[in-house]
Image: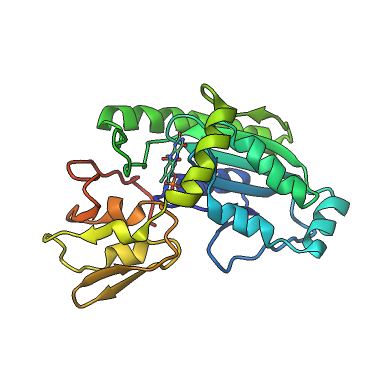
Amino acid sequence: MIYYFTGNGNSGYVAARIGSYLHDCIEKIGDSTRLCVSAEDNGIGLVFPVYAWGVAPPVTDFINGWTLDDIRRINTEKIPVWAVMTCGDEAGACSDMLIKILGKKGISLAGVWSIIMPNTYVILPGFDVDSHVLAQQKLTSAMGRIKEIGDKIQSCTWETDVWRGSWPRLKTHLVYPLFRRWGINPKKWSKGEECIKCGQCARVCPVDNIRMTPTGPIWGNNCKSCMACYHNCPNHSLEYGKVTVKKGQYRIKDYEL
Ligand SMILES: Cc1cc2nc3c(=O)[nH]c(=O)nc-3n(C[C@H](O)[C@H](O)[C@H](O)COP(=O)(O)O)c2cc1C
């Protein structure tokens, strides 16, 4: 079984591709997703985006919900747990963080890979979506990478093959805690005059944190900072303070959120 969290579709797309390659089922990680370990499982996969050089928080919450019974079954039945992390550029020490989270539950990570996908992060000055050409290049090389990783998982060739980038530990240990503390502020999201109140932002939110009202969307406090609402607004009318003004949108083709 492959469990995935996706904000804007990249990781969902990767999970779907690996799932069909391995003939394995996939399940989206939401607030109420529970691990289901069965004797037929030949692996438990985790596919998710890198956030601030660390593990996307919904994935940590999901793992922390694994019960002692689940863990005993994983360990006694020797079910390998593997992970694929999608990132815009570099994963930092995200795999170390994942190993630690699983380690606290008494589970070791069999294999872990990163895949570079188009960037979705836009809410700090200096960060924007990739140019169309760069996004296409990343997607083209991701196709080969997905097949390569699928082959490795199928043949149980476990390894750590992660693009960490420069100063990985520093970035993960310094920036990730700041991101958890300050990086998610749903109060900064607002709709512009072009909002047609179509409800698409509420539909694509992976944690149902947006409520549509007659006057437009209202964000709750459970925002994961995934930016799905921003990128999927058909009129490009959502803003995060003033920082997203003039920034681009990115949606992955052939994937329905
Ligand atoms: C909040 C946030 C933080 C991010 N941090 C990083 C990062 O540290 N390094 C990186 O290379 N990409 C980063 N990205 C880009 C995403 O990891 C990348 O685009 C990923 O494929 C998005 O997956 P998704 O569409 O499944 O959400 C970040 C994106 C978001 C929304």
Residue plotted at (69% across, 36% down): 111
* Nearest the eye: 4 or 189: 189
Q: Position of residue 106 (x, y in %)?
A: 81, 50
Could you say where residue 142 lies in the image, as x and y percent from the top left? 46, 32
- Between residue 244 and residue 137, name the one nearer to us: 244
Q: Is residue 23 left or right of residue 81?
A: left
Q: Residue furthest right?
A: 76
The foreground one among 107 and 148 is 107
Query: The C terminus is located in which quarter?
Result: bottom left
Quarter of the image for the N terminus: give it: bottom right
Seen from this angle, which residue lies furthest left? 193
Residue 101's place in the image compared with 193, above or below, is above
On the image, which quarter does residue 246 sit in?
Answer: top left
Instruction: Specify the farthest residue to the top.
Output: 166
Q: Residue at x 39, y 33 (%)?
A: 139
Q: Is the residue 49 above or below the residue 219 in the image?
A: above
Q: Position of residue 35 (x, y in %)?
A: 68, 62
Ligand 1 quadrant? top left
The reply to whether residue 146 is in sight is: no
> What colouring does the structure picture have?
rainbow
Residue 46 seen in render: yes
Tally of marks: 0
| Residue at (52% x, 53% y) in the render | 5
Q: Position of residue 6 (x, y in %)?
A: 47, 52
